[in-house]
Image (cartoon, rainbow, N blue to C red):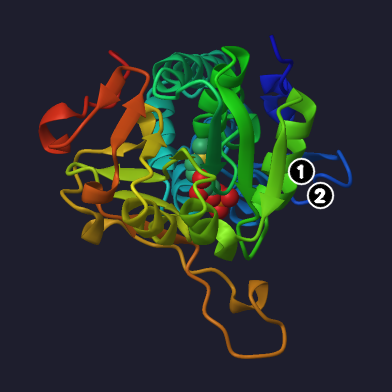
Amino acid sequence: MTQGLAPERIVRLERDAVVLLDQRRLPDEELELRCRTSAEVAEAIRELAIRGAPAIGVAAAYGLALAAARGEDLDTAYDVLVSSRPTAVNLRWALDELRAEPTAERALALHEAEVERCRRMARHAAGLLRPGSSVYTHCNTGALATGGYGSALGAIRAAWEDGLVAHVWAGETRPLLQGGRLTAWELEQLGIPFSVIADSAAASLMAAGEVDAVLTGADRIAANGDTANKVGTYALAVAAAHHGVPLYVVAPTSSLDPDTPTGAGIPIEERDPGEISSRFPARNPAFDVTPAELVAAIVTEEGLHRAPYTASLPVPVRSTR
Ligand code: MRU
């Protein structure tokens, strides 16, 4: 069994703060950031000190519990947290789960359930790979992105433990290098053989027969299976389809948005152009939408879902209170 990052090391609630491993500093420095108000948690999410769709949901849940413990106005805390990033639907889902009972116990239970969902979907997804597979992944979908274990990278980890993975291609993921910094760091810790490559090398690797499957996560999946994920996923999906390489989306049901019929309705975050170029005019969409027809299967904790996704996708879990 590989040893991954402990969930409480990624993000946890202490008496007076939400404490998180500052992902902006990785892999060079392992520093913790203490957020003492819900506004500071929102700032940490906005600035990517914690990032990845499920992980920002977990952080926001802890942020709302912190706000309640501090006696902050909860409507204001909810609004500040929910607007910290627009694309990942997990943020709203987690805050809605916490709203009726914003306690530390409830936030911890949500965190533990997200990690458990990752373990379950990893088992489903691992079964898609044949022995000796070379797998391409984009951005970071590991423990750091989910609060523990990981989605697409969790599936790669489970498949590696089953002896199915020969090599991982970690696309570096311009502009903020979540692949080159965070996925590489996690793969190194897990002892899984990998190479970081430039995003623009993916198609030629596929043409050379060096990619057996592409596994990505998701920030939001519309009712029809259109999937928003880190910018560059769409280009990967086009290249994969051209070369007959299956692209699987691995994401928990907290990333499903049945209220949004198609990808056209998913808000795409535009970040500071300075992240692209400090010298020249730039534009910085952080996500793109991969049309459902380019997705071979969506894997959630409930199992494998194939097109037509309007019929096959489950509904997101909702607390029964
Ligand atoms: O901008 P980020 O780093 O938050 O983007 C994260 C991604 O796009 C991930 O691939 C996605 O959230 C899935 S996380 C399991």
Dot 1: what SS?
A: loop
* Residue drawn where x is 29% and y is 23% of the image: 304
Considering only vertical position in the picture, is 204 above or below 148? below
The residue beneath circle 2 is 25
Residue with the most extreme bottom position: 280
Position of residue 153 in the picture relative to residue 312 (left or right):
right
Position of residue 33 in the picture relative to residue 89 (left or right):
right
Name the image quarter holding residue 165. Answer: top right
Dot 2: what SS?
A: loop
* Residue drawn where x is 53% and y is 73% of the image: 284
Mark number, residue 49:
none
Q: Does ligand 1 reach within 8 Å of label 1's beta carbon?
A: no
**Inter-mark Cα distance, 1 to 2:** 6 Å
* Residue drawn where x is 71% and y is 89% of the image: 279
Query: Which kind of residue does numbered mark 1 sit on?
Result: Asp
Give the x, y percent position of residue 113.
Answer: 48, 15
* Residue drawn where x is 23% and y is 47% of the image: 292
Q: Can residue 57 be seen in this view?
A: no
Q: Do the residues labelled 1 and 2 touch (CB within 8 Å)?
A: yes
Give the x, y percent position of residue 158.
Answer: 56, 17
Q: Relative to the observer, which residue lies in front, 214 or 177?
A: 214
Considering only vertical position in the picture, is 193 above or below 149? below
Give the x, y percent position of residue 142.
Answer: 61, 33
Name the image quarter holding residue 127. Answer: top left
**Crowdedness near tag 1: few (<14), some (14–19) or many (≥20) residues, C-alpha within 10 Å:** many
The residue beneath circle 1 is 22
Q: Relative to the observer, which residue lies in front, 113 or 62?
A: 113
